[in-house]
Amino acid sequence: MKPILIPVTFLILVLISCNKKNTSETTANAMTSAAQDTLLSKKGYSEVNGIKMYYELYGEGKPLVLIHGGGSTIQTSFGRIIPLLATTRQLIAVELQAHGRTGDRSSGISFEQDADDVAALLKNLNITKADFLGFSNGGNTALQIAIRHPQLCNKIIAASVLLKRTGALPQFWEFMKNGTFEQMPQHYKDAFISVTPDSAKLMTMYRKCADRMIHFNDFTDEQIKSITAPVLLINGDRDVATPEHMVAMSKLITDCRLAIIPGGHGAYIGEITTLRPGYKETDFSIPLIENFLEETPPLSDKSFDSPG
């Protein structure tokens, strides 16, 4: 049986974000932004598959690609942990099609296209192999990279992913079907407008994200089983996907670790909508992430016997 780091049996509740910002949160975010600015080595755009993709580079070391969640920007998903990860890694943080500062296409968005876009960006940056940390929909994209571009992947951390419709409670799908722009977390709206002050583009991004989830297509068992890179699945015990779903998905991946952590959707990385006032760096699961990335497999582990 594959190892489960923190087993639980709770079903999830869909977490609705609080849109009110208090003084302590604003101060903490300002301090985080200052730390990011100090570590930022480069930012810019790259032509990928017909759009201009925005990216940021932080730190030095082995490359780790950060892929944000649906409706998000780099900072809403990863702003709190970038300063922590960049002390030992070169971070390549991206914004996906229609999100944040990245361009858009006339077509909808998909995990497959996002995966191909990230792969094209890495080629443009002359990065031939990397680790990946994807959150929520970004975790789905990271797994699609493992499926579609396995040669690029060292290790994959797929955080708070949902790979099959049966993995979430029926109420989640009902909420997605009947959701409105007004219900989109204000944090996401503010973050988008702060980097791309265009309300029409914000609405387009919202509609494309909603459509992708309303018409969500399962990852097939065959696709999941084809993943050869070592994978760490992380999930909150009150996340969108149920712990039972994560256990089932972990059993389909040849080389997989699973961690179920108390908390909501992304609380373990300080995702903006689940960030607690007065948070501390020790609230985040950075040691878990770093240990997985740096772990050397035992010689007896057959999944690591192939060269390269």
Image (spheres, rainbow, N blue to C red):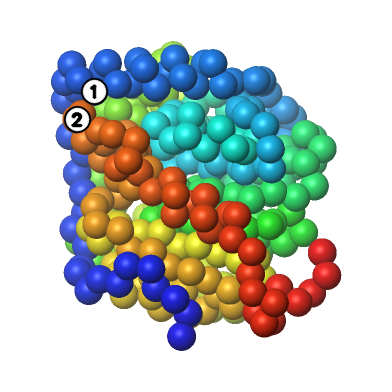
Instruction: Say which mark, if any, is on residue 25.
Output: 1
Q: Position of residue 222 (x, y in %)?
A: 60, 78
Lower position in the chain sequence, tag 1 or tag 2: 1
Q: Residue at x 46, y 24 (%)?
A: 201
Q: Residue at x 16, y 25 (%)?
A: 20
State the residue position of label 2: 277
Q: Is residue 169 visible?
A: yes
Q: Is residue 173 visible?
A: no
Instruction: Please give left or right for residue 46 compared with residue 156 in the image.
Output: right
Instruction: Please give left or right for residue 269 compared with residue 105 in the image.
Output: left
Which element is circle 1 on? helix
Of residues 234 and 181, which is closer to you in this image?
Answer: 234
Of residues 244 and 255, which is closer to you in this image?
Answer: 255
Q: Cα distance, mark 1 to mark 2?
A: 5 Å
**Given the image, on which type of amino acid does mark 2 rest?**
Pro
Q: Residues within 10 Å of mark 2 (few under 14, many from 20)?
A: few
**Given the image, on which type of amino acid does mark 1 rest?**
Glu
Q: Position of residue 240 (x, y in %)?
A: 29, 57
Q: Kindly check if marks 1 and 2 are in contact, taking CB atoms under 8 A apart as contact.
A: yes
* On screen, residue 85 above or below 251: above
Q: Position of residue 265 (x, y in %)?
A: 30, 50
Would you identify the image quadrant in which residue 237 lies? bottom left
Of residues 172 and 260, which is closer to you in this image?
Answer: 260
